[in-house]
Amino acid sequence: VRDEETGNYVMVGKTFKGLTDYEFGVMTDRLLGIQIGRDGHIVKVRPEVVVEVLASDIQDSPRYEAGMALRFARITAIRDDRRPEDATTLEELRRAYNAQFKRKAK
């Protein structure tokens, strides 16, 4: 997600679920082509690829800088029609996180 305050993108999870074997191979090659660093098994890339992701819910997570993580995330679309600036913001994710508790309370 995009942190509007810092202008940086922060991780809220990782997934390859939802991609076919072919799409996974293409995406791997694409991401390795824009790699800017590596931290163990995590490959850091320039923010150039936008994917649409669905998750079962959003949970608190000290593991990620955003303080939240997507649970059971899966990629539903590769959005070549979108720019990184169009990505969900950290504030939008916080609102979705809070809204899920209102839905569960009903």
Image (cartoon, helix red, strand yellow):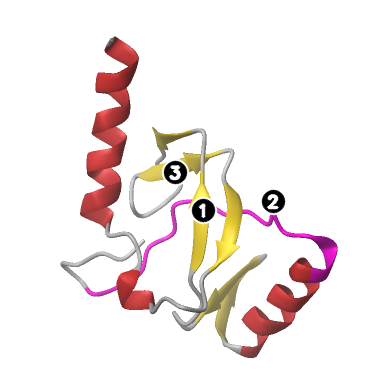
Residue kind at label 3, given as amino acid type? Ala
Real-space CA distance between mark 2 and mark 3, rounded to the nearest whole angstrom: 15 Å
- Write down the residue under mark 3: 69
Q: Is residue 13 magenta?
A: yes
Residues tagged 1 and 2 counted as in contact (Cβ below 8 A): no
Is residue 21 shown above or below 29?
above
- Location of residue 69 in the rendering, given as x and y in whole percent from the top left corner: 44, 43
- Location of residue 18 in the rendering, given as x and y in whole percent from the top left corner: 69, 52
- Location of residue 80 in the rendering, given as x and y in whole percent from the top left corner: 52, 78
Q: Which mark is residue 53?
A: 1
Real-space CA distance between mark 3 and mark 1, rounded to the nearest whole angstrom: 12 Å
Mark 2 packing: few (<14 Cα in 10 Å), some, or many (20+)? some
**Which circle, 2 or 3, is nearer the viewer?**
2
Residue kind at label 2, given as amino acid type? Lys
Residue, x 24% and y 51% (percent of image)? 92
Q: What is the residue that sits farthest to the left in this orientation?
A: 5
Q: Is residue 62 left or right of residue 75?
A: left
* Magenta extent: 7-22
Q: Is residue 24 left or right of residue 99?
A: right
Residue, x 25% and y 64% (percent of image)? 3
Residues tagged 2 and 3 counted as in contact (Cβ below 8 A): no
> Which is more N-terminal, label 1 or label 3?
1
**Which circle, 3 or 1, is nearer the viewer?**
1
Q: Which mark is residue 17?
A: 2
SS at mark 3 in the image? strand
> Which is more N-terminal, label 3 or label 2?
2
